C-alpha cells in the first residue's frame, strides 16, 4: 500500500506537522488499517524529500498521540487504540474545565475561550 502523503513546502504549516496530520487522518479514517507497517524514517524521508529528523519528529508526535506504535527493530505500525485521541482530548478538556473553575471563570466564559481556541486551531 502506497501512502498518499503530500507535503506542501509553501504551506504555513511545518512539514512534520503536515505529515503528522495526514497520517493521523488516514489512520482515523481507516485508510491506514490497524497494524499497517509504516515506512522507515529514512526511507520515508527520502521518498518525501524531507530530512530524516523531520519524519522522526512526526513519528514521535504520532506515537505520543497514540496513533502509531514502534516495535523496536520490527518497525512502526498503526496502533490498535482507535479512541486514544478522543480519550486524551476528553482528559485535556476535563483538566481545562477544572483549571478554569479554579481561576474563577464563569462557565460561559470558559466555554467561549474554548470555542475561540478551537476556531483558531481548525481555521488558522
Image (cartoon, helix red, strand yellow):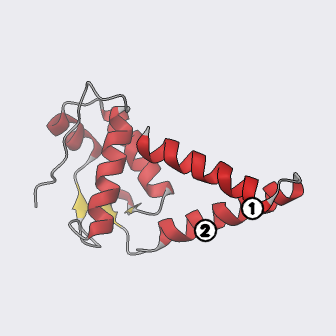
Q: In this view, does 114 lie above or below 58?
A: below
Mark 2 touches mark 1? (CB < 8 Å): no
How busy is the neighbourhood of tag 2: few (under 14 within 10 Å), some, or many (20 plus)?
few
Q: Which residue is drawn at 45% across and 48% down?
A: 60
Q: Residue furthest top?
A: 10
Which secondary structure, mark 1?
helix
Q: Name the residue under label 1.
A: 97
From the viewer's perspective, tell me whether residue 89 is left or right of residue 3: right
Asked whether the viewer can see residue 84, the reply is yes
How busy is the neighbourhood of tag 1: few (under 14 within 10 Å), some, or many (20 plus)?
some
Q: Residue at x 35, y 49 (%)?
A: 21
Residue 36 percent across, percent down from the top left: 23, 67
Q: Residue 10 carries which label?
A: none
Q: Which residue is drawn at 51% across and 69% down?
A: 86
Residue 73 percent across, percent down from the top left: 33, 57
| Mark 2 and mark 1: Cα distance apart in space | 10 Å
From the viewer's perspective, tell me whether residue 98 is left or right of residue 112: right
Q: Residue furthest left?
A: 1
> Dividing the picture into quarters, in which one does residue 27 lie?
bottom left
Q: Name the residue under label 2.
A: 90
Asked whether the viewer can see residue 75, the reply is no
* Mark 2 or 1, closer to the camera: 1
> Dividing the picture into quarters, in which one does residue 100 lie?
bottom right
Q: In this view, does 116 lie above or below 64?
A: above
Residue 93 percent across, percent down from the top left: 65, 62
Q: Residue at x 50, y 55 (%)?
A: 64
Q: Is residue 1 above or below residue 123?
A: below
Amino acid at each position: 500500500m502506497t501512502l498518499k502523503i503530500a507535503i506542501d513546502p509553501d504551506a504555513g504549516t511545518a512539514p512534520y506537522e503536515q505529515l503528522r496530520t495526514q497520517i493521523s487522518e488516514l489512520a482515523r479514517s481507516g485508510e491506514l488499517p490497524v497494524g499497517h507497517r509504516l515506512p522507515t524514517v529514512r526511507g520515508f524521508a527520502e521518498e518525501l524529500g524531507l530530512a530524516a529528523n523531520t519524519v522522526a519528529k512526526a513519528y514521535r508526535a504520532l506515537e505520543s498521540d497514540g496513533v502509531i506504535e514502534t516495535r523496536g527493530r520490527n518497525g512502526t505500525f498503526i496502533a490498535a487504540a482507535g479512541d486514544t485521541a478522543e480519550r486524551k482530548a476528553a482528559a485535556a478538556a476535563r483538566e481545562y474545565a477544572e483549571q478554569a473553575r479554579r481561576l474563577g471563570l464563569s462557565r460561559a466564559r470558559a466555554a467561549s475561550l474554548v470555542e475561540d481556541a478551537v476556531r483558531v486551531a481548525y481555521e488558522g
